[in-house]
Structures are given as C-alpha cells and as structure tokens.
Image (cartoon, helix red, strand yellow):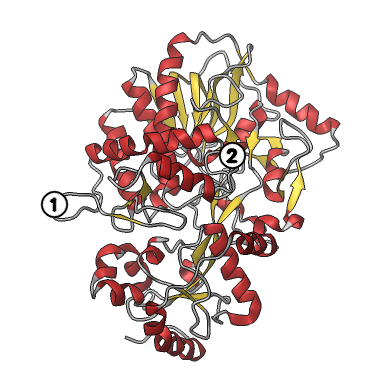
Amino acid sequence: MSFPYTEEMMESVKKVEATRAARMAAEPRRMTAEEKDALLEQYHPDYNLSSFAEIIVGPNKGEKAPKELVELLQAKSRVQGMTLDLAHPDYDVDVLVIGGGGSGASAAIEAHEAGANVMIVTKLRIGDANTMMAEGGIQAADKENDSPAQHYLDVMGGGHFANVPELVEKLVMDGPDCIKWLNDLGVLFDKDKDGNMITTHGGGTSRKRMHAAADYSGAEIMRVLRDEVQNRKIPVVDFTSAIEIIKDTEGKAAGAVLQNMETGEILIARAKCVIIATGGAGRLHYQGFPTSNHYGATADGLVLAYRAGARLLYQDTLQYHPTGVAFPSQIYGALVTEKVRSMGAQFVNVNGEAFMHPLETRDVAASGVIREVSRGNGVHTPLRDGIWLDSPMIDAIHGEGTLEKRLPGMLRMYLRYDIDMRKVPIVIYPTLHYQNGGVRVSVNGMSDVENLYVAGEAAGGVHGRNRLMGNSLLDVIVFGRNAGQEAGKQFKNVTLSDLTLEHVDNFEKECEAAGIHTDEVSPKILPDYRRKK
C-alpha cells in the first residue's frame, strides 16, 4: 500500500520505526507537578489571555470568558421585535428537554419513567450530538480493585481540585449503577469470553475503569438511548431550535420559544420544568482551533440559561484534546481517541523521539504537543505541523490484529484516505474538544433559575478545569438521568402563573445601559462556514 505522506514525512517515519523497539522497552517518565504547571502556563490555550474578554452584564459580570462566547452572551435576542402569543402555547408538557444527545435522552427517559408528559426538542435530529462522536469509553469504578473513592481522587486531581466536590461525589457514586443501567438497556460493551467487562486505563486514571464498545462507545450508547426514547413513544420535535427560555411571572422556568429550522415558524412550548441538555461549544472555534464537535455545538444552552438569570461556572476553561487529526485535510480536527494511547501508542517527534508519557492528563498532553511543535520538532505536512502518534506500537505490544479488533472505527477512518495506521504512525495536533465549564448547577441539577435544570456538557463544575477521559459519557448519563428524575418529581408540585419574556427585555436594557452595541444575535444555532467576502 502506498501512503499519501510526502517524501519528507516518510523519511521521518523511518526514524520512528528505527526507534520503536527501544521506546517499547523504556516507558517515558511522567512529569512532576512543577513541570506540569510550568508547561500549562506557557503553552495551554487557556493561558492565552488575549483570547479572553470581560463579561460586562449578567450574573457573571466582571469575569472572563472566550471572546466568541462573550459576544454571544451579550448579543441581541432572536425574539427581539417579535410579537408572541404566550397565552396560547403550541405545546403544553410537564417536562421540556432541550437537546437530543445522550444527556437529553437520558433525562427524557427518567422523567417519563416518573410519570411526566415529556417532550424533546432538538435543532438537528435526536442523536446528532457530541455523545454520538465519543469514542474511547465511559469510566465507572465497578471492579474489585477499584472504588468510587479512588475514582473521586482521580477526578479531583485531573480537574486541578477546582471541581465542585458534591458533583464529583454524585458522578463517582452513581457510576457503577449507570453502567448496569446501560448494559441492561442493551449497550454492547466489550467483554471477555466469560462475560466480564474489559476495562482499560485513560490519562490520569489510577485504575483500569474505562468501559468501552470498541472505539465507538458514544455511538453505541446513543443507539440504545434513542431506541428507548422511541420505544417509550416520547415525542421528539426535531430540526427545531430553542431560542429563548420562557419564565412565569414568579421567575420560574416555564417553557421555551422554539423556531422551526426549515420554515422559520415560531412556536411556544409551555412546561412545568425545563432541562437544558444542549452540549458544548466547539463550533465557535475558540482561538481558531479545529474541533472534534458535531455541527450543532454552538453554546446555545449557555446563552439561553444566562439570559434567563443562571450563573455560569468555569466558562473560561476549555479542553483541547491532544490528539486531533492534523493530516489529511478531509478529517482535519477529528478526534483520535485516547484509547489509542491507552493501548500503547506514544507521542513521537520528527526525529523519532518519545518526548512525553502517552497518558498524561489531556491539558498537559495537549500543551506538550504544542510545545514540541513550537520547538521545531514537529512533523511537517502539507496541512500543518504536528506530532506522530505511533499507532503500529499497538499490534507490536498486544499482537497482530489487536488494533483492528479494538479500534475498528479509527482504522476505517484512516483507511478511507489510504493511511493504514497499523503500518505507519498518524499525525496529530490538539483539537477543541470539550467545554469544561458551563451553567452552575446544584447536585439535583437545578440552575439558579427555579425549575431550570442543566445536564451534560452544558453544565459546569463536575470536571473543574480539566476533564479526564471517559468522564464525559459518565457525566452525560449520571446527570442526565439525575435531571430527569428530579424534574419527574418536581413537576407534580408546580403551578405556573402567566408566561413572560420580561427577563429578556430586562437583559437587553442592561446591555444598552452598559453601552453594548452589536448586530450579533444569539443563540447562534449553527456555525457559519460561508466564505467571507
């Protein structure tokens, strides 16, 4: 097989091959805490202060956030100038779930189980979400040599001890039950011949607790959740975006203004409880980074909750996954799962040198890759400079056929472009992957706005300032189910007064008083990739 690598790249591949045996015999050392701190401060994108701006209005006034997010938080509302009949809603339900990914589906299932009349509204289709794109696995401490306490320490350490402890406790304590719940629903986890779940390490884990379904874990989980939503006949309104949260005159969340993406029709949904499960913000392309996120990841949930009066937490911290595709161009920025490294592949520079332990935490690993390239040790490609990920090490360590069996999705993705990652290393560079922060929530999932719940990537606090591999899928399930269960209890005690959008008018007045003048409208809904004139 001929590979689409340049002659210069193939010369570097020879150096990688020449050092492979020696590298396999000597594991790269891990960095000290002091080395990690120095590396992050100098090279991690979150420390690039010029890319952040101050929030001028709202609950987080005076705090910093990425410039792109600040523009959306302080933009004009899409309902500005509209005449809306809130007294005659098009939909009237107990629980409205905004978002059709893993968290939204889990929430809807649990609220339905509690007896609520539930509706999901999603701007794309159910399953068009970051959950679908998650690859490596889902953590849970359900093995004899592990415990939720050990998992707790790993999560806190990975998040630089900035995590909200109560949320982390909820995450790790509910983890084993969530694995059982998914398994009972039909998720096909990797198992050995005796039916025991196979678990592996991830960056920052002290025990092997990563449960996976090959390298398409999120897609497998989403398949089962979507089936369960359909089996329960939970209504899904797709290609319809929530563009504003509605409150009642007492300040409680009471529904949402919706817009049909195809016709532009405006619809009103009244609900006793609202769950925001809108996912992340990768399609804002902070600092110009490519992203592994799905097409709809535009921070809509943060905008909706913020204008409704909910406070954000750690909105200034993002996760740049260390292994995004740097070549070829057709899949630029796509995720190369951490599972590739957990199975032995090393970071290797243009000279064939392993310069960093493969399982440092993601923020440290991403910073290490950026530093190595900045030192002139990157692999030059027609697209951009990157670093080798020595994927042929997997079969060399575990036996021929291992990569094909355990990473079939990765293998197929590269083979489409004539790159056989069993034979040659692949080129990677950090990609914008995850929104570490989000809307501040309590342990029951409720935001600062009564009866407005937030779950999954749209919520902040559980991961602190850095997330470990496998904790996002766990977050999605634990807190999606939790929000659904809590809303399923809460709606029975809710009596709504008249619906209002007065909070939107008040927010716009606050922006005007602060001297904010913009043509930007939000939520963004979808990214704009049209060529600028």
The residue closer to the viewer here, 388 or 115, is 388
- Horizontal and vertical percent position of residue 219: 34, 50
**Tag 1's secondary structure?**
loop
Q: Nearer the viewer, residue 371 or 309?
A: 371
Residue 125: percent from left, percent from top: 41, 42
Amino acid, disc 1: Asp
Instruction: Pick the residue in front: 480 or 418.
Output: 480
Inspect this view and state whether residue 259 appears: no
Secondary structure of residue under mark 2: strand
Q: Quadrant of the N terminus?
A: bottom left
Residue 286 visible in rendering: yes
Q: Residue under circle 1?
A: 194
State how far apart marks 2 and 1 are (Cα).
41 Å
In the image, residue 484 above or below residue 303: above
Q: Residue at x 39, y 34 (%)?
A: 173
Query: Which residue is under mark 2?
Result: 438
| Front of the two marks 2 and 1 | 1
Label 1 packing within 10 angstroms: few (<14), some (14-19), many (20+): few
Quick one: 166 or 183, which is closer to the camera?
166
Residue located at (24% from left, 65% from top):
405
